[in-house]
Amino acid sequence: MVIASVSPIHEFASIENVNCVPCGNSNDSQNWLKEIKLNHLTSSQQQQVLELLTKYNNVFAQNISDLGECGIIKHTIKLMDDIPTKQKPYRVPYNLKNEMKNQINILLDAGIIQSSTSPYCAPVLLIKKSDGSFRLVADLRKLNSRTIPDNFPLPKIDEMIDQLSGAKFFSTMDLTSGFHQMSMHPDHMPSLVYLSTRDYLSV
């Protein structure tokens, strides 16, 4: 089935800037619309884009508390056996204890993680990012070593391009925090448990 066609581009529109939607707290859910640069479009096209974005404003996350959930699939983890993998927590430097506590509280308050009594357990640590902030990550290497590989054929790029034939507009969408927005199948949630210095937590 052909859903699009490919045609030559005779003129490239100059884009002034590519912006990210701010994810900080905002009292006005429309504020982020003002940050989007649409100068490369005509006035009529700009209005159409803004109307579309306003109509579906609820799908754009403003902060971690309204990330939403991608429920297209329920992620599953196939293990080689039923023997739980369990590790001791890593030592957290004293100057980072409050940072880890704050990040865990944010995830708890947002409903992204919850307390757990699962026999599985992976340690967590803070990784420093290029901007100086820290990312909370779980070391799941031991669990990964017990996971059955999931081999899935990737689509061919040329065939994907063929399917775009005839399209006039192209856009890309991304999850603000994909790792925290993919749904887990309830039966597989116990295997994704990590241990902070104070509690057992699961996604």
Image (tube, grey):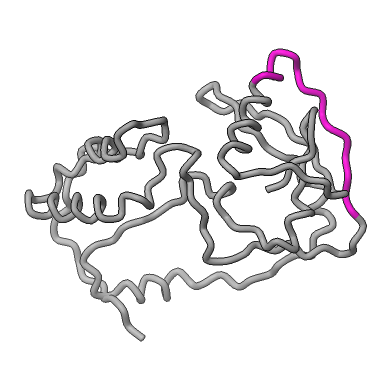
Residue 77 picture quarter:
bottom right
Which is nearer the eye, 187 or 122? 187
Q: Residue at x 15, y 56 (%)?
A: 48
Q: Residue at x 26, y 76 (%)?
A: 5
Q: What's the magenta region?
A: 84-98
Query: Residue at (74%, 35%) from the top-left corner?
Result: 124
Q: Where 177 sits versus 196, above or below?
A: below
Q: Is residue 175 left or right of residue 20?
A: right
Q: Position of residue 33 (x, y in %)?
A: 25, 41
Left or right of residue 32: residue 196: right
- Decide: is 1 above or below 147: below
Instruction: Give the dominant element type of the magenta stretch: helix, strand or loop.
Output: loop
Please provide percent x and percent y for residue 108: 63, 38
Give yes or no for residue 89 being in the magenta stretch. yes
Query: Which residue is at 36% across, 86% downward?
Result: 1
Residue located farthest toward the left when viewing the structure as drawn? 43
